[in-house]
Image: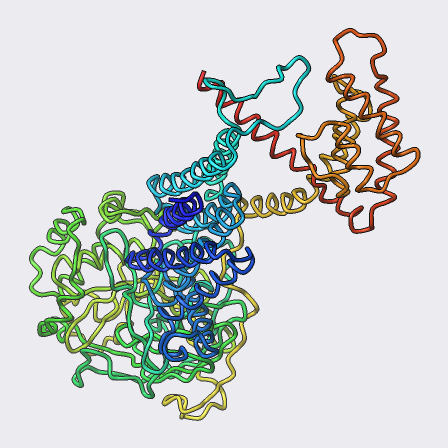
Amino acid sequence: MSGRTRLAICGLLATLAASCAMLPLVERPVWVVQAAVLLALQTAVGAATRRVPLARWLTLALQAASTVLLLTLVFARSRAVAGVLPGPDALAGLGELLHQGAQDVGRYAIPAPATPGIRLLLVGGVLAVGLVVDALAVTFRSAAPAGLPLLALYSIGAGLAKGHTGWLWFLAAAGGYLLLLLAEGRDRLARWGRVFPAGTRPPGASGGPAATAGGPALAPVRTGRRIAALSLGIALALPAALPSIGGGLLGARGQGEGDGPGGGTISAVNPLVSLQNSLNQPENREVLRYRSTSQSVQDLYLRIVALDRFDGASWRASERRITDVPSPLPTPAGLSPATRVTPVGTSVAAASGYGQNYLPMPYPAAQVTAPGKWRYEPAGRTLVGDHGQTTRGVRYQVTSLHVEPTAAQLAAAPAPPEDLLREYTKVPSSVPAVVAQTAREVTAGAANAYEQAVRLQDWFAVSGGFRYDTEAAAGGGTDAIARFLRDRQGFCVHFSFSMAAMARTLGIPARVAVGFTPGTPQSDGSVSVGTKDAHAWPELYFEGAGWTRFEPTPSRGTTPDYSVAQQAPVPDPGAPQPAPRPRSVPSGVPAAPQGCPPELKKLDGCTAPAQQAAGGASDAGPGPLTVVAVVLAALAALLLPALPLLWRVTVRGRRLAGRAPEPTLAAWRELTDSAWDYGALVHDDALTPRMAVDHLVRTAGLAGAPAEAAGRVAVAVEQVLYAPPGRAGAPDGTAVTADVAVVRGALRAAARRRARIRAVLAPRSAVRLLWAARARWARATARLRR
């Protein structure tokens, strides 16, 4: 096997090893198989073109073209010319799929489903990195820089999947890079034999080779080890600085996406952190303002999404198919004509700073009129933005149904359908047994599912000794509910998650809804909804009423009338009717908007003047750590470009001031670095001082005094390096420094403006910083080995 072939295979393996860091990002690792096959074909194309041989740029171009062809065959074959060639339609299809993948990344939580867009991003990213690695390591025979794209590939996966990647993926990426370096070192030694070290020998050093049998490691091996150690150190530190994918249902995170009419899927992220952040904001920023035809808004919760997938550690929304928004919306599942229903018209205006892709609506909505691109998810009866559509500044109208079942109807509800019961009563085996045991103890003696639900609600809200606390740790893991039942303090997420899980252990279909409580009525008849109104509550299913809201969180929201424990009536005909028993009733009720026609109740286009929010945003302000991180990043961004300039100014001053231990050699180093910076001399420590000066004089066109000064510097350096120690007539360091200043002035005068600017702002000799860091690392590791 030739050296190039060995390098190509090692580059392929290194790329695949680094891409393993992205395995935790998606649910199914099928994309890795696709990436491996396509990467092997891409590498084979490069190997074949290098055998012809072709120019390097042509090899790279053919590999890039083959990459596009392979991606077209896998992801856009139906739009390709003759099903193979990537024509304009196929390229447009790939672009659309990339756009969808970018939106899916923001919409899904980790691990995300392997949608076509996400698979294209992953496979295409691996192929792009593989192309760069193959070009650097094999085509241009420079394996060390190939670690940068490999580092980027690993760091992106490790940084985004923070908390999901393990040490195994790091070892895989590190091993792949080391394998590539070793293969390159072996190939280089096979072609050139023993390589002697570069650099100036100190006085008194022997003139023999630096690498002899049994001596220090060969230069390529040492260089490979040093580069590998530095890169692996960066790989360990960089993921900690990368932001992890977050998001929430109350902020601008996530996009709905579809493949056309009747297609597409949607899921959501865990809202626990977003809810807690919103509730703990010092300022109650307005996110929505609405007007309603309801005479009492205490039950008008604005629901965003339903979380129906319980994995034992958290509740999430299932991946669902989405369709075009029907008009009117279908009849809610399980709602019987015998149940009392009152239509309610609501006109909503979202704040300009409130942008998230689910449309908050009263549940269940019967008809929606909203500008923009929205899709409908039938199981949760939610509307999700399509192609970047958000609620930011949107005004919309909703006709919803105020469902009013009686306690008797819920108590006599028949068993739910078998498929619904099976899906919404799933409880993982990882849930601690104390959860089901506590549910049975709390509901002991209940005659039916309705009585069990009421007892659970009252136990959390009244009799169980629970305390509402938004500062309580959000927690996580399969023991989160058991921990909450033990500590008995938390906020709405803890109460709703726990009641829904306990209801499922009793065989009651349950899920968790996320949204807003009714808000605060205003003097103009509108109702303001702010960040502190963010809320979560359980929904339990009863045949005849459908999904029914319960309120287990103490001091939050209102308890539905049908869930209040019924007491024996007192025979007093003259007594007034008791008011409903909400735990927190708004102080006023908004009046119907003036001048609004009766059609608002049917939502046939009435656009009552909803008050625009005062510009408040739902997004939580940046915390102090975020501010500090941003400031440090900004300072680093400003200082890093100036680092070479600052280093050169400092080093030049030290060298020319005579403060170095050997001023003549320091002045010589300044002369060669200056010539290197101005492009008049290529750095090559194999040249003798006289050869270097001859090359400098020819390249820079020096003549007269500058050329003579350069010659005197070369003679002085040779005397220092090769003359016997203690010999009279040693060079004068001050005179040598003056000659170097003359040569530097001539180099600057002869260089073009662009070369002068580059020599100041981005000097080539600044690479010595990296060399020095590698040398220190090598010395440190050598001491550790000893």
Q: Quadrant of the C terminus?
A: top left
Judging from the image, the colouring scheme is: rainbow
Determine whether, in the image, residue 246 is placed left or right of residue 467. right
Q: Can residue 533 be seen in this view?
A: no
Q: Nearer the viewer, residue 278 or 403?
A: 278
Q: Is residue 382 above or below residue 429?
A: below
Q: Is residue 342 above or below residue 475?
A: below
Q: Which residue lies furthest to the right in this view?
A: 704
Determine whether, in the image, residue 551 is placed left or right of residue 777. left
Quadrant of the image occupied by residue 520: bottom left
Residue at 36% from the left image edge and 90% from the top image edge? 602
Q: Position of residue 94 (x, y in %)?
A: 43, 71
Q: Where is residue 683 in the image (x, y as percent from the top left)?
A: 69, 36
Q: Position of residue 31 (x, y in %)?
A: 32, 59
Q: Can residue 745 be seen in this view?
A: yes
Quadrant of the image occupied by residue 765: top right
Residue at 49% from the left image edge and 53% from the top image edge? 132
Q: Is residue 410 above or below residue 755?
A: below
Residue at 51% from the left image edge and 35% from the top image edge? 230
Q: In which quarter of the image is the N terminus?
A: top left
Q: Nearer the viewer, residue 153 or 410?
A: 153
Count of marks overlaid on the render: 0
Q: Residue furthest front?
A: 52
Q: Nearer the viewer, residue 371 or 653?
A: 653
Q: Which of 276 and 338 is in front in this view?
A: 276
Q: Position of residue 774 (x, y in %)?
A: 56, 30
